């Protein structure tokens, strides 16, 4: 399996490995209820629970799982503010999934698209080993646009449940912005 870059830069972001300390910087902005409207997570009830989760992520994949977990924090170069997280997971079946979470105060600025573009470049050596996928709630046009802008196309619908209600996830697959399908 090819090696991966653990950190990097985009024009406006510094992407760095996620650590427990990032919870201190993200906790307040990740409490906004709108952030959880289209994702199955809920806000952490305490800073300590968020620290524990980030500590687990930073500790790496569970032994013998056949998985690879990669987690980063997104930091603005302009002022050093940590504004979100970025994830890539390679499962034992070869499928590779990406995800991101961005503080609502930074929505609509193209930062998620910039971070996803960095992640795709970082994962390019992995792409021959399995598909790169992402799941988005069918009611979330902003995240759908981030994926389409970065070369993803809708693959299928999947029934889902979100906060106790039936919903539909749209599963996207990376085809490259240069692909003609």
Image (tube, rainbow, N blue to C red):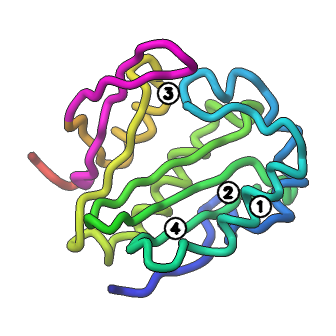
| Secondary structure of residue under mark 2 | loop
Q: Mark 4 or mark 3, which has the lower sequence index?
A: 4
First in residue order: circle 3 vs circle 1 = 1
146 horizontally vs 108: left or right = left
Instruction: Say which quarter of the image contains residue 128.
Output: bottom left
Which residue bears the numbered disc 2? 12
First of labels 3, 2 by sequence position: 2
Label 3 sits on residue = 142
- The disc at residue 26 is none
User: In front of the other: label 3 or label 1?
Assistant: 3
Residue at numbered disc 1: 77
Q: CA distance from mark 4 to mark 3?
A: 25 Å
Q: Tell whether position 4 is magenta.
A: no
Pointer 3: residues within 10 angstroms few (<14), some, or many (20+)? Answer: few
Using the numbered discs, state the Cα–Cα distance from disc 1 to disc 2 in whole angstroms. 6 Å
Numbered range of the magenta stretch: 156-177
Residues at circles 4 and 2 in contact by the CB criterion of under 8 Å: no
Residue 70 horizontal side relative to residue 31, left or right: left
Q: Residue beneath label 4, please? A: 69
């Amino acid at each position: 399996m090819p090696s991966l870059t653990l950190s990097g830069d985009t024009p406006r972001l510094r992407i760095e490995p996620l650590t427990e300390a990032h919870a201190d910087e993200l906790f307040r902005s990740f409490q906004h209820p709108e952030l959880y409207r289209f994702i199955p997570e809920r806000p952490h009830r305490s800073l300590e629970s968020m620290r524990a989760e980030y500590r687990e992520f930073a500790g790496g994949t569970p032994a013998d799982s056949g998985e690879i977990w990669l987690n980063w924090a997104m930091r603005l170069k302009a002022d050093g503010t940590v504004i979100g997280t970025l994830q890539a997971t390679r499962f034992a079946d070869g499928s590779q999934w990406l995800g991101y979470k961005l503080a609502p105060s930074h929505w609509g600025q193209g930062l998620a698209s910039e971070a996803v573009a960095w992640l795709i470049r970082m994962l390019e050596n992995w792409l021959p080993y399995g598909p790169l996928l992402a799941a988005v709630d069918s009611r979330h046009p902003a995240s759908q646009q981030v994926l389409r802008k970065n070369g993803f196309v809708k693959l299928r619908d999947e029934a889902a449940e979100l906060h106790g209600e039936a919903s539909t996830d749209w599963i996207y697959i990376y085809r490259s912005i240069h692909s003609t399908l």
